[in-house]
Amino acid sequence: MVERASVVAAEEEAEQSFDAADPESVNKVKKQAGRRRKLRLEFVAKIMADREGRRWVHDILRQSEVFRTSFCERDASPLSIAFREGKRYIGLLLLGDVMKAAPATYTLMVQEAEERKDSPLAPPSGV
């Protein structure tokens, strides 16, 4: 874990000298982004491998209301919709990472939530 942290720190330091006109700099940044994405997906897979990790992810997805619309008739102001959409976007980012890193454990997470009688991720019918 220390090695990964030092690699990320070195990459962040190297980013400060980025030149978008230099193809070599652009390729270096693309490689760094790929490594960061790989590390993030590995981390998500580790979280999803743990029962409490799946519970935490489910809680975040439920609270971000990823399977609901951001429009709400009782509060349809643009700022309120934008706030709900921002919250939903964070959940969608996490859901995308889960589905990429550990799709089989997503189903397990939903089954465990049903066993706990947690609020479902999807809204009740008719909402």
Image: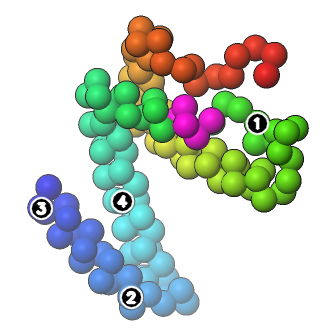
Look at the numbered disc 3 and give the secondary structure of its residue: helix
Look at the numbered disc 1 and give the secondary structure of its residue: loop
Report which residue position mark 3 lands on: 2
- Locate residue 34, reporting x and y percent: 40, 59
Q: Is residue 52 magenta?
A: no
- Locate residue 70, reporting x and y percent: 76, 42
Instruction: Check residue 69 in the rendering and tell me which mark sits there, or answer none.
Output: 1
Mark 4 or mark 1: which comes first in sequence? 4
Magenta stretch in the rendered image: 61-65
Report which residue position mark 4 lands on: 36
* Residue 74 appears in the rendering: yes
* Above or below, 47 relative to 85: above
Residue kind at label 3, given as amino acid type: Val
Q: Determine crowd level at label 1: few under 14, some 14-19, many 20+ residues with C-alpha closer than 10 A.
A: few
Q: Nearer the viewer, mark 3 or mark 1?
A: 1
Report which residue position mark 2 lands on: 16
The answer to whether the residues at label 4 and label 3 have Cβ atoms under 8 Å apart is no
Mark 3 or mark 1: which comes first in sequence? 3
